[in-house]
Image (tube, grey):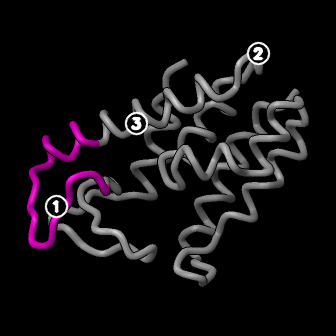
Amino acid sequence: MNTSEVGLNLIKGFESFQPVAYVCPAGKWTVGYGCTTDVAPGMRITQAEGDQRLKEDLQSAENCVNHSLPGVNLTQGEFDALVSFVFNCGCAAFRGSTMYKLLLTGRMEDAAKQFDRWVHAGGKELEGLVRRRAAERALFESSIA
């Protein structure tokens, strides 16, 4: 599967484009739409470079979701929500999560509740993550039959 426009807009809305590298709340150098790969202090990128980095990072998150859940039939909304989550938290965190274990066993409603647990960075609850996880959960649950 690939991320829909709805999923892409959700990610862009929470990441927002930042042309100058900055340290995010998790303590990582970040630029563009939340890109943390090959970022250095003082780095500047264009909108086009930000869009390209987002495309590459998004493909990595899509691959993680597509390859981590064999035999799990996801709706588009579930897929988009999970890609946003993986984009933000990383594939290793996703694969080590209770959410992942619940998804593998088909417990979609229980898995949806797990979004609410992922609202901390740097040991603190962040309002931005609370809003993002609520939006991801709503998108995920909008697809549960």
Query: Does the magenta-highlighted stretch encompass residue 42?
Result: yes
The picture places residue 26, in percent across and down from the top left corner, at: 45, 73
In this view, 132 is above or below 120:
above
**Amino acid type at mark 2:** Gly
Residue under numbered circle 1: 19
**Residue at position x 31%, y 53% in the image:** 35
Quadrant position of the N terminus in the picture:
top right
- 30 w.r.t. 11: above or below: below
Residue for badge 2:
71
Task: Decide which of tag 2 and tag 1 comes sooner along the chain.
Answer: 1
Query: What range of the chain is rendered magenta?
Result: 36-53
> How many labels, in total?
3
Disc 1 is placed on an element classified as strand
Residue plotted at (72% across, 48% down): 138
Kind of residue sitting beneath label 3:
Leu
Residue 78, percent from left and from top: 69, 33
Whichever of labels 3 and 1 marks the residue nearer the N terminus, that label is 1
Q: Earlier in the sequence, mark 2 or mark 3?
A: 3
- Mostly what secondary structure, the magenta segment? loop
Q: Nearer the viewer, residue 133 or 23?
A: 23
Q: Is residue 110 left or right of residue 100?
A: right
Residue 83 sits in which quadrant?
Answer: top right
Find out whether the residues at labels 2 and 3 contact each other: C-beta distance under 8 Å.
no
Q: Residues within 10 Å of mark 1 (few under 14, many from 20)?
A: some
Classify 15 as above or below 103.
below
Residue mark closest to the camera, 2 vs 1? 2
